[in-house]
Amino acid sequence: MEGKDLLSMALAARKLAYTPYSGFQVGAALLCEDETVYTGCNIENAAFGPSNCAERTAFFKAVSEGRRSFLAIAIAGGPSGKEPEDFCPPCGVCRQVMMEFCDPETFKIYLGKADGEIREYRLKELLPLGFSGKGVERKE
Ligand code: THU
């Protein structure tokens, strides 16, 4: 699975975004180590706080179905009514969720636009000195 394939899946997932409060629609496609792909879109809420980003939707779908190992995510976002013309980098909260489950040295983040342009990053570049929970006692 290449970045361009993941980007097409992110662009398709973006069509399902529920964004009445921002009109900013994001799609994500998360590639698991076993080659399954989980997609996600952002889902907003009238109370604002409960809104969920596309990336976390994809991660939480995958983890809730037993996936724990991830290779890459593609993200595409922009104002509704047109295809994404700019790159949409993940928010800080989503970067931290990636940090929980992914190796920052190897996990790839593809930012894509509708014209097919892709930029590829590693998690460590987008979250330098990220908090991995090392030293936090694990109960299980
Ligand atoms: N959003 C995402 O879904 N992912 C990102 O990477 C950035 C922001 C959503 C949150 C909110 O629904 C809308 O985009 C505007 O911030």
Image (cartoon, grey):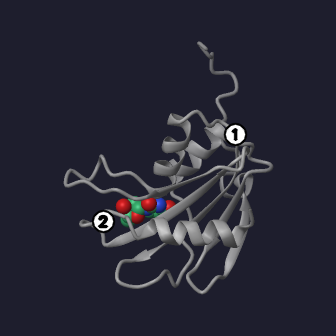
Ligand 1 location (quadrant): bottom left
Question: Percent from the top left, x then y, of residue 63?
Answer: 55, 37
- Cβ of mark 2 under 8 A from ligand 1: yes
Quarter residue 112 falls in: bottom right
| Disc 1 residue type (three-letter) | Ser
Question: Percent from the top left, x then y, of residue 76?
Answer: 53, 70
| Disc 2 residue type (three-letter) | Thr
The residue wearing badge 1 is: 69
Return the residue nearer the eye: 16 or 81. Answer: 16
Say the numbered circle drawn on residue 92: none
The residue wearing badge 2 is: 19
Q: Residue at x 24, y 67 (%)?
A: 20
Foreground mark, 1 or 2? 1
How packed is label 2: few (under 14 Cα within 10 Å), some, or many (20 or more)? some
Quarter residue 119 falls in: bottom right
In the rendered image of this protein, does residue 114 appear above or below residue 17?
below
Left or right: 116 as drawn, with respect to 78: right
